[in-house]
Image (cartoon, helix red, strand yellow):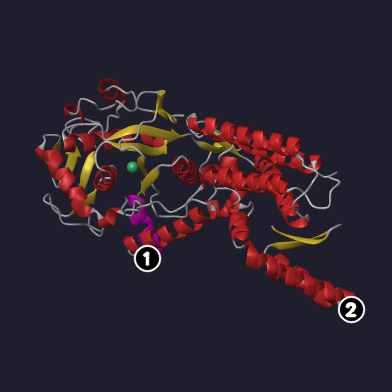
Amino acid sequence: MTIKIYNTMNNRKEDFHPRTPGKVDMYVCGPTTYDLIHLGNARPLIVFDTVRRYFEYSGYQVTYVQNFTDIDDKIINRASEEGLNPLALAEKYIKEYYTDAGALGVRPATIHPKVSEHLSEIIAMIRMIIDNGYGYVVDGDVYFTVSRFGGYGKLSGRRLDDMMAGARIDVDERKEHPMDFALWKAAKPGEPSWDSPWGKGRPGWHIECSAMAVKYLGPGFDIHGGGFDLIFPHHENEIAQAEACAGTGPFARYWMHNGFITVNEEKMSKSLGNFFTVREILARYEPEVVRFYMLSTHYRSPLDFDDTKLDMNKKSLARLHNALDNIEALLSGVSFGPSEILMNAETERFNTVMEKAEQTFREAMDDDFNTALAMAGLFDLAREANAFGKAISGYPGKAFPLEVKEALEQAREKMYKLGEVLGLFEHRGTAAEDSGLVDKLMELVIEVRREARSRKDWAAADTIRDRLKDIGIILEDTPQGVRWKQK
Ligand SMILES: [Zn+2]
């Protein structure tokens, strides 16, 4: 089935046709690196990481570009507060970005370009814009002439006349039109600056994305993404710059925007005291719970953050883990072999419902990446796996038929495969992959502890349990003996 994407440019869902068959080229606006990333930053990261994962699951080769804005007023101000060089400050927060994004299961983009490393491309684009008649220079600043660009407002659905009426009165009189925006800003004393044909200065905010997207993906690339708040003016300006430079459009073919995040139903802001960094949230909730929660709502809808909702989602996610635990316990806890008593009916039914669950998942994701509905497919799988476990529990033979083993292995594989699209079960995934060695080591540890207990060396037994707990492994006593699992 074709993937459908809600394209902000036309305000409707459209069939996705890649520019190059089998390939997806996407650009997503990244953070300005002057501080730790916050909840509002985390949503687009998770949303577009999931979009990318789903394209990969669907067989596409994805080139994913996400920039770092490392030259900006906020960085300059913060650097002077911290007594650091602005680029050193930006570099520090880029490192922190990788820590937090990585914790949330956000994979690094294919390319993470930085503004500071693309001054020549930016300057070249500004020159071309001026040469094509869409820019003008005033006292070392360069502005974009919005009234010359006929398509200005096409993404946000605004008309230039209305924007003019709404413009504040204290406009810079050097500008030809109040909506003209800066492509290049002349250097102020003490600020970092770069040489340009218009004197020393630095780029305006919007030009970097146009220049870097075109450099890495070329004009007319597939998908451009970001938060709703970027539609105007940022993305509108990106389009104007790139298309004025190329002399033609489109700059990008599909525009995707994720909804806002509120906290306790209020806009997140420092003054309201409900502003959270990702790190603060991760001190209280497992990253997987945060990711699961962010994907439990369609990406274009607003998402409200509060503890009750996170706690509920934690429980839901635990149900999925539980089903995986059960599958894994069955696979390692019972014996399989050739058997006269077959369980074809149960196994066949299970295989059918598994296929259907994956289909539910795919249909939901094909429909504009509806992760909330896709999760229903995962829950179907979990519920059916549990039911299958129950259905076969009364099996009278000595060894379970091999078909049962195959079905269980398939269920496990499917849960991991679908989970991977959403970025779930990843720490379990690695444990399962090298389970050969880990399982053997854990068997050994459990055996040593059992021997300690049998000679009544409670201190040693407790130490083993506690130290395992410190590294996130929990021992559980079950009728079949001691079981271990990762927290
Ligand atoms: Zn951008």
The residue positioned 44% from the left and 31% from the top of the image is 3
Q: Position of residue 372 (x, y in %)?
A: 58, 34
User: Can residue 214 be spotted in the picture?
Assistant: yes
Q: Position of residue 409 (x, y in %)?
A: 65, 49
User: Can residue 187 be spotted in the picture?
Assistant: no
Q: Position of residue 103 (x, y in %)?
A: 54, 55
Q: In the rendered view, does 70 fall on the left or right side of 242?
A: right
Q: Nearer the viewer, residue 12 or 261?
A: 12
Q: Nearer the viewer, mark 2 or mark 1?
A: 2
Res. 205 image quadrant: top left
Q: Nearer the viewer, residue 35 or 164?
A: 35
Q: Nearer the viewer, residue 165 or 93?
A: 93
Dot 2 amino acid type = Arg
Badge 2 crowding class, 10 Å Cα cut-off, few under 14, some 14 to 19, many 20 or more, is: few
Q: Which mark is residue 221?
A: none
Bounds of the magenta span? 73-84
User: Which numbered disc, 2 or 1, marks the residue that appears first in the sequence?
Assistant: 1
Q: Which mark is residue 455?
A: 2
The residue positioned 77% from the left and 55% from the top of the image is 335
Res. 475 image quadrant: bottom right
Quickly name the residue at label 1.
83
> For the residue with label 2, is its CB less than 8 Å from the closest atom of ligand 1?
no
Dot 1 amino acid type = Gly
Kind of element beneath mark 2: loop
Q: How many marks?
A: 2
